[in-house]
Image (tube, rainbow, N blue to C red):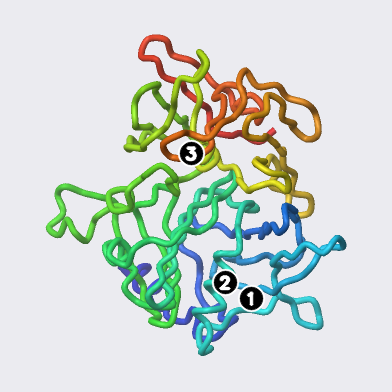
Amino acid sequence: MRKLLAFALSVTLLFASAGALGAEAPVGMSSFMALAIRSSAGKTVVGLNGKVPLFWFDGKTFFICEIETAKTKDGAEYKKPKTDKEGKPVICAPSSKDFTKKALQSLTSGIYCVLEPQEAVAICVRLENTCLYGVFSKQGAIRFSQIGTDRAAKIGLTKPNMVYILDQDYNRLVLALGNTQKVVSQEAPNPDTADPERCLGIKDVLPYECLSFEQLGRGHLQIWTGKEEIVSCGIRSSCPQVTATHQGSVAASLELLCAQLGCSLEKGTEQNEFVIHRFVSLLWEKPAATELRLKIGQFVGSVDGKRVDFPFPPYLDQKTKKPMVPLRAFCNALGARIHWRTLDSSALVERFVRK
């Protein structure tokens, strides 16, 4: 009890100012940083500034850096963390009038690579009437996504300008930072509790749909031919147009595969071209990525500039107008091992592991 009271008292000091560092981190929470990736005109800029992360948690305080627009030598625009004259990051101050706008710009600028997290971390951010949710792991990260205020309220995101950090199981809120200066504690789901609403886990609140925002790099993705559902890391969810039989082979949704396997997806410079990146290195100084390029209607694509052949060309589904790709060839091209289970006609895809 004494430790709990001491921890509660220390957290009240957090975010009293932009650089407040007055509390010990809860047990199990390690520091982490995030690298911003932004593309424009078909260009992808990686490793913008190894010394200035987009946001970071130093074990005590969660910092959000302001962003600014810059241009590459060839004129492509991208977003990067803003620095002062000394090269230090310009921090979004929670007390400033435009904090919500600046923080929202920063968090939605494209986050794909996380550095040095020793455990998975889920982050929820409430900015006035905007709620964002993102999950990070050792193998990488996906960008923040907006969630409804009703869902956010169920997991305790009721106060504006708050940052909530959850544990690796997504069901225990271990730290809350923000203007309210209040400790929020939420235990894992327990049927014996007197107040079950208070103990709702995040898995029970946020539905895992097609493009789910779950942890990357752990477990498997299982999909079936002819079924509109998937099982990802043990979580079953419905999802329309997962697979299709095309020219005797199995095709799968490109958007679903990228979202579930932790890849970035963007349109290329040429017509009907898609560019996919899988990050294979978490080094802050030199983040590395495997690049896959493919075109709708073309049998030939490329992986890091080398030719790759598809059993049938990627195509647009007639009903959804969404791109479909050869399942096995796509996974092989990006190094995701795939196992075919003839017993139930399902494919089991291993989630990415660093090379």
Element at label 3: helix
Please identify the residue farthest to the left as the structure is shown.
194
Residue type at mark 2?
A: Gln
Residues at marks 2 and 3, CA–CA distance in whole angstroms:
25 Å
Is residue 337 visible to the viewer in this orientation of the structure?
yes
Of residues 70 and 27, the one drawn nearer to the viewer in this rendering = 70
Element at label 1: loop
Q: Position of residue 129 (x, y in %)?
A: 37, 75
Residue appearing at x 44%, y 59% in the figure: 133
Residue 315's quadrant in the figure?
top right
Please say if 130 is above or below 220: below
User: Where does label 3 land, which residue?
Assistant: 256
The disc, 2 or 3, on the residue closer to the chain's N-terminal end is 2
The disc, 2 or 1, on the residue closer to the chain's N-terminal end is 1
Sort mark 1 into few (<14), some (14-19) or many (20+) by Cα contacts within 10 Å: many
Of residues 22 and 280, the one drawn nearer to the viewer in this rendering = 280
Residue type at mark 1?
A: Glu
Residue 244 relative to residue 105: left or right: left
Residue appearing at x 29%, y 56% in the figure: 187
Sort mark 3 into few (<14), some (14-19) or many (20+) by Cα contacts within 10 Å: many
Residue 224 relative to residue 192: left or right: right
The disc, 1 or 3, on the residue closer to the chain's N-terminal end is 1
Closer mark to the observer between disc 1 and disc 3: 3
Of residues 30 and 75, the one drawn nearer to the viewer in this rendering = 75
Residue type at mark 3?
A: Leu
Residue appearing at x 54%, y 86% in the figure: 17
Element at label 2: helix
Q: Position of residue 69 (x, y in %)?
A: 71, 72
User: Where does label 1 land, which residue?
Assistant: 66
User: Where does label 2 land, which residue?
Assistant: 105
The reply to whether dot 2 and dot 1 touch (C-beta < 8 Å) is yes
Residues at marks 1 and 3, CA–CA distance in whole angstroms:
31 Å
